[in-house]
Image: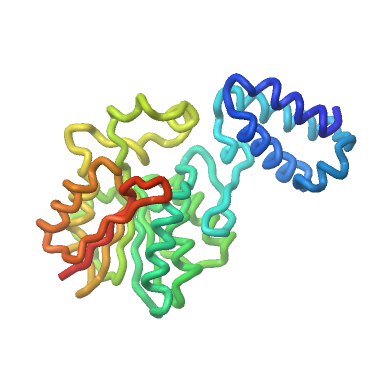
């Protein structure tokens, strides 16, 4: 089977599940991954015929896509802030909204040197690694509950040539942090269980639920605990950044104010949803 027929096959087999544009995106990601060929290469070589072993990879990927398995897990990698990241089912797939959070932090602090930074719930390491790459001489630390996630994050730190201090820990069980920081950043679980009905199967079936979901009875549980820890662990005028549930911005703002934080700012993402919050230690 040549490339042009393979593409037609993908479009035909997946049309009931995904829009045509998304299927084409999947196809080109796979050709880049398995054949090192981009859109232009395919346009110039539509009759290119693959070896049987490569055909097997495409067939497997097609079957996984039919089950709504995320394309990023299929190829085992993604890009975040222009950097390469290896990923698997032990970590969340980095989102554009999280890139916006990181960009916000960098825009406010890129001219400062040797900042002490803590990333809580690091997952793939996308936040901590991106900050280490973009903040000069920053001392970056990262915590995660999952040892398997930390293995992924450590590989990504090596891949991106940054030095980060990783440690395993349950943030809800930590009573105090043993250092002080200029910046604390977290993208904690914030999707309420009741919101699952509006989510796609590729997220529900395959991404790690413990990194996504919280009980409806206490949806701010991570923000409460991290906020308390940050109040004592941040240096004077230190800053706390969160990615947030768009429906919980108001109560979260009130919570942080009750902890004594000032200059609290909620920022919208590109889709117009309240997605980030920044608070300053008074």
Counting from the top left corner in percent of width and height, residue 180 is at 25, 70
Query: In the picture, which quadrant includes the N terminus?
Result: top right
Counting from the top left corner in percent of width and height, residue 28 is at 70, 40
Which residue: 46% across, 68% down?
A: 132
Q: Count how many numbered circles sit on residues in the image.
A: 0
Seen in the image, is 64 located left or right of residue 45?
Answer: left
Which residue: 31% across, 48% down?
A: 274
Counting from the top left corner in percent of width and height, residue 166 is at 41, 59
Seen in the image, is 133 located left or right of residue 219?
Answer: right
Q: Seen from this angle, which residue lies furthest front?
A: 272
- The picture quadrant where one finds residue 229 is bottom left
Q: Nearest the camera: 93 or 98?
A: 98
Seen in the image, is 236 located left or right of residue 63?
Answer: left
Q: Nearest the camera: 46 or 220?
A: 46
| Colouring style | rainbow
Which residue: 60% across, 43% down?
A: 76
Q: Nearest the camera: 13 or 89?
A: 13
Counting from the top left corner in percent of width and height, residue 46 is at 86, 37
Seen in the image, is 218 located left or right of residue 103?
Answer: left
Q: Nearest the camera: 226 or 253?
A: 253
Query: In the picture, which quadrant includes the C terminus?
Result: bottom left
Depicted 35 relative to depicted 177: above or below:
above
Depicted 103 relative to depicted 60: above or below:
below
Depicted 104 relative to depicted 255: above or below:
below
- The picture quadrant where one finds residue 42 is top right
Which residue: 37% across, 27% down?
A: 198
């Amino acid at each position: 089977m040549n490339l042009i027929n393979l593409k037609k096959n993908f479009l035909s087999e997946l049309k009931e599940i995904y829009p045509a544009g998304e299927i084409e995106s999947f196809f080109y990601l796979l050709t880049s991954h398995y054949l090192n060929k981009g859109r232009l290469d395919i346009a110039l070589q539509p009759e290119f015929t693959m070896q049987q072993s490569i055909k097997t990879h495409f067939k497997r990927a097609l079957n996984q896509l039919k089950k709504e398995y995320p394309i990023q897990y299929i190829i085992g990698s993604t890009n975040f802030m222009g950097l390469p990241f290896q990923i698997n089912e032990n970590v969340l797939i980095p989102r554009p909204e999280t890139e916006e959070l990181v960009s916000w932090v960098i825009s406010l602090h890129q001219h400062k040197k040797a900042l002490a930074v803590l990333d809580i719930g690091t997952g793939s390491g996308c936040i901590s690694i991106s900050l280490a790459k973009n903040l000069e001489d920053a001392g970056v630390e990262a915590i995660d509950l999952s040892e398997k996630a930390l293995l992924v994050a450590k590989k990504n730190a090596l891949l991106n040539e940054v030095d980060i201090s990783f440690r395993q820990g349950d943030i809800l069980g930590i009573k105090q942090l043993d250092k002080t920081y200029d910046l604390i950043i977290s993208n904690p679980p914030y999707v309420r269980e009741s919101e699952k009905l509006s989510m796609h199967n590729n997220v529900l079936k395959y991404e790690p639920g413990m990194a996504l979901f919280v009980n409806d009875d206490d949806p701010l549980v991570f923000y409460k605990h991290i906020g308390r820890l940050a109040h004592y662990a941040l240096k004077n005028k230190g800053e706390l950044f969160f990615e947030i549930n768009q429906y919980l911005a108001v109560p979260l703002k009130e919570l942080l104010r009750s902890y004594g934080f000032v200059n609290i700012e909620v920022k919208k993402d590109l889709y117009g949803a309240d997605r980030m919050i920044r608070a300053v230690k008074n």
